Image (tube, rainbow, N blue to C red):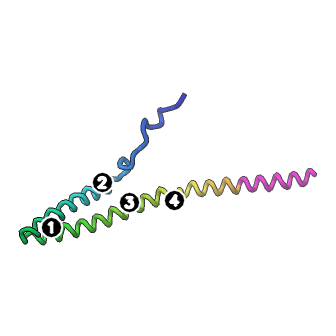
Amino acid sequence: MTDTSTRSVRPDTRWERHSSTQTLAELLLGLSFITAVAAGGYSAATGQLTVLSQGAGIVFLVTLTCVLVSWFRSVEREDTPDDRTVAQAARSTAATTAQDSIAAIDAEYRR
């Protein structure tokens, strides 16, 4: 029998682990891209709204940089082992080595 009281029915997806700030930044990225493209197209056709187009382009580039940095940091965080896991593995290795050393001394003594 499997205990399902402590486990979720389905695993968490990537978007469920996003903070509200990261979600807001990604939404702003999409909106600034749409605004930059629309205002750029309109300004190319009519010669107006160039300031809005340039402002939307700047917001898009800044937001894109923030989202990419956040994404790379989260990927790096997933790839590196947790410090507690590394420390625990080092302690267990040291304990095993000490036990092996004691066992070797004991075997030598008994011989």
Residue where numbered disc 3 is placed: 71
State yes or no: discs 2 and 4 in contact (Cβ < 8 Å). no
Q: What residue type is labelled 4?
A: Thr
Q: Tag 1 or tag 2, which sits nearer the N-term?
A: 2
User: Dot 4 lies on which element?
Assistant: loop
Do the numbered discs 4 and 3 sit on residues whose CB atoms are within 8 Å?
Answer: no
Classify mark 2: helix, strand or loop.
Answer: helix
The residue positioned 53% from the left and 57% from the top of the image is 81
Q: Position of residue 33 (x, y in %)?
A: 22, 62
Where is mark 4, residue-wise? 80
Kind of residue at disc 1: Gly
Asked if residue 45 lies left or right of residue 99, the reply is: left
In the rendered view, does 106 fall on the left or right side of 41?
A: right
Q: Which of marks 4 and 3 is nearer the N terminus?
A: 3
Query: Mark 1 and 3 residues: CB-CB less than 8 Å, in contact?
Result: no
The residue drawn where x is 18% and y is 69% is 55
Q: Name the residue under label 1.
A: 40
Q: Which amino acid does label 2 sit on?
A: Thr
Stretch in magenta: 95-111
Whole-angstrom CA distance, mark 1 to mark 3, is 28 Å
In percent of width and height, residue 4 lies at 48, 32
